Amino acid sequence: MKTKFKINDSIIVDDRVSTSHCRTPSYIRGKEGIVERVCGEFPNPEEIALSYDNPSIIPLYRCRFKQAHVWKNYKGSNIDTLELEIYEHWLKKK
């Protein structure tokens, strides 16, 4: 499997607006994190939702974000994290 990112790479989630089905939550767009693991390759769910006959097969990553970097008024511990699975086409190198 050829991937753009590897474990511990710094990433930024693309902040583009999606007008159709999207698994990338709006609250995480534009946020910085790291790749925690490579989950494998899967059919693009955005293309599946639009009934593509042959959806692209793309890598999926588990990404880790510091809670304090995600939520503006976060009052918990500075070591608290949030992990999300995000497809490669939503990630950019930091």
Image (cartoon, helix red, strand yellow):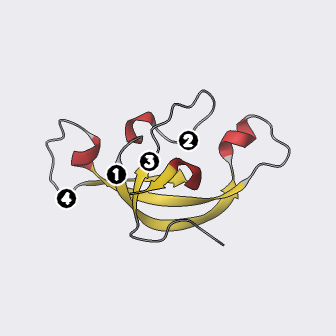
Q: Amino acid at mark 4?
A: Ile
**Circle nearer the N terminus (3, 4):** 3
Query: Residue 55, position in %: x, y?
Result: 77, 48
Q: Is residue 87 left or right of residue 12?
A: right
Query: Residue 78, position in %: x, y?
Result: 16, 54
* Mark 1 secondary-structure assignment: strand
Query: Could you tell me how many numbered marks the image carries?
Result: 4
Query: Would you call the spot at circle 2 few (<14 residues within 10 Å), some (14-19), or many (20 or more)?
Result: some
- Given this view, does label 1 or label 2 mark the residue nearer the observer? 1
Residue corresponding to mark 4:
79
Residue most extreme to the right: 53
**Circle nearer the N terminus (1, 3):** 3
* Mark 4 secondary-structure assignment: loop
Q: CA distance from mark 1 to mark 2?
A: 17 Å
Q: CA distance from mark 3 to mark 4?
A: 20 Å
Which disc, if any, is residue 23? 2
Residue corresponding to mark 1:
32
Residue corresponding to mark 3:
13
Q: Amino acid at mark 3?
A: Val
**Which residue is painted at 51% across and 31% down in the image?**
17
**Which residue is painted at 62% across and 33% down in the image?**
21
**Circle nearer the N terminus (4, 1):** 1
Query: Residue 48, position in %: x, y?
Result: 74, 42
Q: Is residue 88 left or right of residue 83?
A: right
Cβ–Cβ under 8 Å for marks 4 and 1? no
Q: CA distance from mark 1 to mark 3?
A: 7 Å
* Mark 2 secondary-structure assignment: loop
